[in-house]
Amino acid sequence: FVVPNPVDIGEFSHLPEFGRFRAAYSIGEQARIVLFLGRIEARKGIDLTLQGFAKIKSVHPESRLVLAGPQEDGYLNIVTEMAKSLDILDQIITPGYLDARQRLEAIVDADVFILTSYSENFGMAVVEAMAGELPVLISDRVGIADDVLFSGAGVVTSLNPEEIGKGLIYLLSSDEHRKEMGCNGRQAAQKYWPQNIAETI
């Protein structure tokens, strides 16, 4: 049988108050935040994320895309040039590596977590976002995609910027859907708690 990847989500039992991450990066309370957490590298499909995000500008002009994490092989320069060409550079925030506290603050303040990887065996950051009651938008190449669909924790798309853009608009346009998916994700994430996995072996 298959044993799921264990993810220690104990730190999500006590989340920070809303607004700390936004205050640190001068993001207003009304702005929608799409959050990526991970290495800034080509395999993560950040090019697709940028293209999809560009398609929501007319609907959510106040939105911000946070690309948080260390860069790989200078890839952030490529991301910056791509954002310029898509006319969304002023909506992109790149805080670099976030420590444990900052990561929780980012998850609490975000509206949607995004991971449009070309290939991802599992997706630990997705589980962490779900544990923080954050709805997710991920590609169907992320290993946890079936669980996200089954639990109703978010939206799964193909590697298509149009589809990614539509998924973002759907999520950002409905507080009710985001809240429901966040609750579903929180419950689904319990499956990956090490103790719960141990009990199934």
Image (cartoon, rainbow, N blue to C red):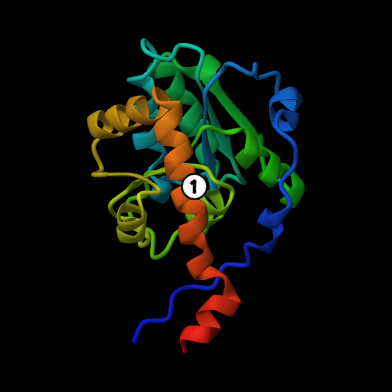
Residue 104, can we see it?
Answer: yes
- Residue 69 x %, y %: 61, 44
Corner quadrant of residue 194: bottom right
Give the answer, above or below, for where 143 lies relative to 152: below
Residue at position x 35%, y 62% from top?
143
Instruction: Name the kind of residue labelled 1 in the image.
Output: Cys
- Apparent side of residue 15 relative to residue 88 in the rendered image (left or right): right
- Residue 39 x %, y %: 54, 49
Q: Name the residue beneath numbered marker 1.
A: 183
Is disc 1 surrounded by few (<14), some (14 to 19) or many (20+) residues within 10 Å? Answer: many
The residue lying toward the viewer, choosing from 143 and 197, is 197
The residue lying toward the viewer, choosing from 16 and 25, is 16
- Apparent side of residue 2 relative to residue 157 in the rendered image (left or right): right
Residue at position x 45%, y 11% from top?
61
Give the answer, above or below, for where 69 lies relative to 128: above
The residue lying toward the viewer, choosing from 179 and 138, is 179
Residue at position x 70%, y 58% from top?
11
